[in-house]
Amino acid sequence: MCYAYQVAGKNAKKRANVNKRIYDTGVKENRLEVGDAVLVQKVGLKGRNKLADRWERDPYVIVDIPDPAVTVFQIRLESGKGPLRMVHRNFILPFISVPSDEEDPTPITPQPDDDLGPGRP
């Protein structure tokens, strides 16, 4: 019985190493630093959420990285309200900016062309 456990353990370790190598080939590293803005994934969605928004609406800021070797970040709402949260890297998405409601872009109005060509009114 002990021999069977040893063989099974060796095979499981080999397979885990192969799976890690395959997974690591597809990973794209994106370094996050203190002060970076991120979005947090909603967890615990109930019911049918095929088309649901999977990211929280309010942006967060990375406040601290307790251990650089571990992919866990301490975040807080960008507004500064609310408690600190510890979130794993798999549940955050870096982003550059969010359009604000305060910005009112000037609408672009088409200008009439003076020269429309022959036969055009």
Image: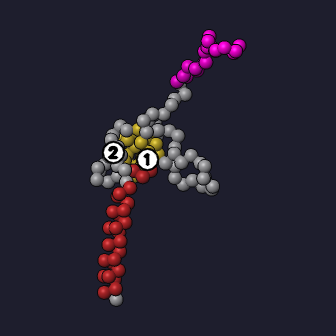
Please indicate whether residue 26 sits to the left or right of residue 116 in the image: left
Q: Using the rendered image of the protein, determine whether residue 3 is visible from the camera's viewpoint.
A: yes
- Tell me the element at label 1: strand
Query: In this figure, which residue is indicated by the disc labeled 1?
Result: 92
Q: Using the rendered image of the protein, determine whether residue 72 is visible from the camera's viewpoint.
A: no
What residue is shown at x 55% (from left), y 19% (from top)?
106
Please indicate whether residue 49 sits to the left or right of residue 35 in the image: right
Query: How would you classify the magenta stretch by its main secondary structure?
Result: loop
Residue 16 picture quarter: bottom left
Residues under numbered marks 1 and 2 in contact, where contact means CB atoms less than 8 Å apart: no
* Furthest residue toward front: 118
Q: Position of residue 102 (x, y in %)?
A: 53, 24
What residue is shown at x 34% (from left), y 67% (from top)?
18
- Tell me the element at label 2: loop
Query: In this figure, which residue is indicated by the disc labeled 2?
Result: 31
Kind of residue sitting beneath label 1: Ile
Which coloring applies here? secondary structure
The quadrant in which the C terminus is found is: top right
Residue 24 picture quarter: bottom left
Please indicate whether residue 42 sits to the left or right of residue 86 in the image: right
What residue is shown at x 60% (from left), y 49% (from top)?
51
The quadrant in which the N terminus is found is: bottom left
Q: Position of residue 55 (x, y in %)?
A: 51, 45
Q: Is residue 102 above or below residue 21?
A: above
Nearer the observer: mark 1 or 2; the answer is: 2
Point out the stretch of residues depicted in magenta.
Answer: 103-121
Sequence order check, earlier mark of 1 and 2: 2
Residue 116 picture quarter: top right
- State how far apart marks 1 and 2 are (Cα): 12 Å
Please name whichever residue, 80 or 48, is drawn nearer the observer in this view of the structure: 48
